[in-house]
Amino acid sequence: MTGDQQDMFQRLRALLPTAWFPGVAQFLDALLAGIAYALSFVYSLWAYAKQQTRIATATDGWLDMIAWDFFGAALLREPGQSDDSFRFRIVINLLRGKGTRPAMVQVLKDVTGQAPIIFEPNRPKDMGALNSPTSAGYCGVARLGSMAVPYTAMITAFRPVATGGTAGAAYCAAPSQSALNTPLASSYTNSLSYTRSSASDADIYAAVDAVKPVGTVMWVGIR
């Protein structure tokens, strides 16, 4: 692997004239192996530092420092929140369109990977209008509107597709995923513990709250 001790050793060995040393030189190789170990450690520090220069790859406390630089105390990591989850919150609050319906659709697509369903009771186009062929209920079934709930929307968001398990996995790997008499099986106490999702429900609620206009009410249902 690039940057590991063996890689550094081979690079150092390649720099030496082949006529000076035999193919196997125990003392020389031991010396170079020690130098290679130090160089591989330095390389790992450089690779780690490089990761911290971008929000997409930053981890640990460096991600908290990035959030503080942009938002101060307004955006802090929740107790026990993972790097991926915290990164979502940073991204949705940074250079993000706000206060519009397209902005709400876009932020939820970015967080969940799926477009939400948004219904505004005070918006004729979300219902049916006789002279508006593009309205939802012009030639079909639509919800009833209401003038009694202005500045209100009902949002149906969808959880990201879970990853980590595969179809039929319990059939092929019963001891590790699905076994009633095997306490170490993933489904022994929780059938979903073998799968994981990149964004939690809390991330979805935070995205809606970050983008919604001031003075509005957003009812959110998550599927």
Image (tube, rainbow, N blue to C red):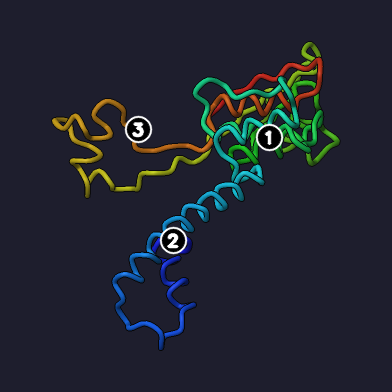
Label 2 secondary element: helix
Mark positioned earlier in the residue sequence (1 or 3): 1
- Given the image, on which type of amino acid does mark 1 rest? Ile
Residue position for label 3: 193
85 or 160: nearer the eye? 85
Extreme residue in the bottom direction: 19
Q: Quadrant of residue 28?
A: bottom left
Q: Residue furthest top?
A: 148
Q: Distance between the residues labelled 1 and 3?
A: 31 Å
Question: What residue is shown at x 39% (from left), y 44% (from top)?
Answer: 164
Residue 168 as seen in the image, left or right of residue 72 = left
Q: What residue type is labelled 2?
A: Ile
Looking at the image, residue 16 sits to the left or right of residue 220; the answer is left
Viewer-nearest residue: 26 or 99: 26
Mark 1–mark 2 CB contact (< 8 Å): no
Decide which of 3, 78 is in the foreground and name it. Answer: 3
Give the x, y percent position of residue 64. 63, 30
Measure the C-alpha gap from mark 1 to mark 2: 35 Å
Q: How crowded is mark 1: few (under 14 residues within 10 Å), some or many (20 or more)?
A: some
> Could you say which is closer to the camera, residue 67 or residue 154?
67
- Callout in the foreground (1, 3): 1
Kind of residue sitting beneath label 3: Ser
Residue pointed to by mark 1: 66
Give the percent coordinates (x, y) of residue 147.
81, 15
What residue is pinned by disc 2?
35
Q: Residue at x 76, y 25 (%)?
A: 212
Mark in the foreground, 3 or 2: 2
